[in-house]
Amino acid sequence: MRAFLLPHLLTGAAERFPDRIAVRDELGALRYAELERQSNRLAYTLRESGVLRGDRVGLFLNKSLDAIVGIYGILKAGAAYVPLDPFAPAARLAYILRDCGVRCLVTQREKGREVTQLVVSGAPVETLVVSNAAAREVAEPLEGIRYVGTETLDAAPEHWPGAPGIDQDLAYILYTSGSTGQPKGVMLSHLNALAFVEWCHSYFRPTPEDVFSNHAPLHFDLTILDIYTAAMAGAALAIVPPDVSVFPVQLARWIEERRITIWYSVPSILAMLALRGNLAVGRLPSLRHVIFAGEVFPTKHLRALMTLLPRAQFTNLYGPTETNVCTYYRVPVLPENQTESIPIGLPIDNVEVVVTGDDGRPAAEGETGELYVRGNTVAHGYWGDAERTARSFLLNAFTPARDRMYRTGDLVRRREDGHLIFIGRRDHQIKSRGYRIELGDIEAALAAHPGVAECVVVAIPDEVIGSRLKAFVVTNEVVKEGDLARFCADRLPKYMVPESFEFVSALPKTPTGKTDRKALVTSSVPVPDHT
Amino acid sequence: MTTVAKLRDFVLNELHWDESRGAITPDFPLIENHVVDSMGLLMLVSFVEEQFGIALADEELVPNNFGTITSIAKLIEQKKSEG
C-alpha cells in the first residue's frame, strides 16, 4: 500500500525490517517492530482517553525513545502533535496549549514539576499520558487531571487498526516566533511532510544501513527530515544527547562511535565542530552526508569543515517552517578566496519558487525580489489566525491553477545558472543559532516591564551563531540589566533573551520618525582592529 | 574578586541564568541544567581565556572541566600554574 500518512512509513519499515534498530538514545534502542507495537498501544490509549481525529495532542518530554513513540502514537490516533520546547517558560507553553486547545499531553515522569507549572499557568490540560510510569507512581498528582500510565499502555492492543484519516489532515503544529509578542502555530499536514520526505529519500538515497543523527529539538522542523526519512528507508535514527553536543570534541567522538552516516543540523553546531572539534582529515569516516539548514553557514567555517571531511557530501537546505524545505544546494569544493555565502540553490522536486519584484511580477534574472513558494510542501496556514494566514498564504496569481502560495518575506535573486541567492529579510525577522526570531516578539515582552518606556531590539551579526541580540532601552525608573534579562527569561525561550542591554535617553529616529535600527546596529558592531 | 565569584558573575550576567530555576552554587551542575549550552560554552571559553590569560585546547573542553564552577576554577588554576 502507498504511504499516504506519516505512520505508514513506520508500519512499512516494521514489515520489511522488524529487527533493525529504528531509534537509539543513550539509554537504549527500539527495533522497528517494537516501535510499531509501542506506538500502536499509545494510539489505542489516546483513543480510549477521548482523543478524536483532528485533536491536538501536546508532546512534552525530553528527547528520548518515548518521544518518538509519542509522535507516531499521536499520529496513529488521528491527532496532530504539538511538540513543546521542554526548556521554554511555562507561560509561553501554556499560551500555545490554550491557543490550539490541547487537552491531552503525552509526557514522562521526569517532567512532573514542569507539568504542574504548565497547569498553574493556565494550560487547559485534562489528561496526562505518562509514558514511563504507572499512574499511581506519579508524585503529587494534580487535582482534576486524569493520569494514564504504563499500566494502561502495556495492556493496550499492539496492532494498528489502520489509517484514521487522509493525507490532508494535520500531522503537527509547530509554533514559531510571532511579530506581535505571541508565537504562531504553523499547521502542517501529512502530505506537506511526505512531499518533502519523499524528495529527501530520492535525493540522499538512504539505505537500511544508514544512521541518521537526530540533533534538532522536536519543536524545530529540522527533525522532519531525519525522523521520517530514516523510517522511509528502514534506517536507524540516533538521538544526539544534549550534553554531548555542548562539547565539540565529545560530539565528534559520538558521531564516530555511533557511526553516523547522515548528519543534519543548524550550521552553528557544525561551525563549532570545525572550530573546536579537534578534527583531523580522515576522522568520521562513516559520515557520507552533512546536511544543514536554518541559517547561513559562514563560508570560512564551511570550507574548513569540508576540508576536514573530504569524503562527505555537503548540502544546504532552505525553507521556512511554512514550506518545510523548498530549495537545496549541493556545495561544491569552495575556492580558498571565496568569501560570499553559498546559494540556497534550486527548488526540490515538485515545488515551484517564484521571485517577485515590487510590482508583483516575476523578477528578471539577477533582480532582487521576494520569494514565493508553491507545492505540496506548503503548510495549511496558522492555527486559529485566518487573517495572518490570508496575508501570508496567497492565491497564486502566476498560473491559472489558483492554488495557494506562501509569501516567505525572504529577499532573493536568481543567478545565471538558476540558483537562488539569499539576500535578506523584508521585515524584522532574524535568525540566531538556526532559530527564527521576530524582533517584535522580544520587544513586546520587554515593553511589558513597568520600568521600560521604550525599547528596540536589534540583531548584531555574528560569525558563528548568525546574530546576537541587543536591546536598547529607555527607562522611566531605575532598572537593572539583570532584572530586564530575567523578566525576558520568564516570558521568552532562552535563545530570544537579549545578550546585552544598553540604556539610552532616547532611541534614534529616521527622518520618517521610525526607530533607526540601522544606526543602532552600526553603533554596536565592533570596529575592526587595524593595528 | 575570586575566580569562583567571577565565573558566577559571568553565568548570571552573560548567560542570563535565572536563579529562581536553581541557585548558582560552586557545585551546581551547569550542563544538565542547561545553564551552559553549546553557544554558552563558546562564550564561557572566550571569557575564561581572556579574563585569566590562558589558552585552552579543544581536548580540554569536556564535561569534567566545565561541569561546575568549581571544576572550571580548578582548570583555571591548573593552567595558570602550568603557564
Image: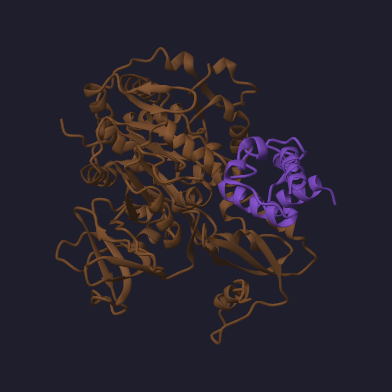
Is A241 positioned to the left or the right of A319 in the image? right
* Residue A291 or residue A313, whichever sits in front: A313
Residue A390: image location, x then y, percent: 34, 62
* Residue A250 or residue A490, whichever sits in front: A250
Residue A354: image location, x then y, percent: 25, 67
Up/down of A369 relative to B39, above or below: below
* Residue A415 or residue A98, whichever sits in front: A415
Name the residue located 48 percent from the left edge and 53 percent from the top edge. Answer: A271
Is A306 positioned to the left or the right of A250 in the image? left
* Residue A447 or residue A16, whichever sits in front: A16
Is A468 positioned to the left or the right of A1 in the image? right
Residue A351: image location, x then y, percent: 22, 56
**Chain drawn in purple:** B
Instruction: Look at the image and tell me whether residue A58 can be seen.
Output: no
Name the residue located 45 percent from the left edge and 40 percent from the top edge. Answer: A83
Is B23 positioned to the left or the right of A492 in the image? right
Instruction: Look at the image and tell me whether residue A193 can be seen.
Output: yes
Up/down of B25 relative to A11, above or below: below
Q: Residue furthest bottom?
A: A511
Up/down of A326 relative to A85, above or below: below
Location of residue A9 (image quadrant): top left
Up/down of A527 relative to A164, above or below: below
Query: What colour denotes chain A?
Result: brown
Q: Residue furthest right?
A: B1
Name the residue located 36 percent from the left edge and 58 percent from the top edge. Answer: A389
Residue A261: image location, x then y, percent: 34, 38
User: How many callouts does the rendering have?
Assistant: 0
- How is this picture coloured? by chain
Name the residue located 24 percent from the left edge and 58 percent from the top edge. Answer: A347
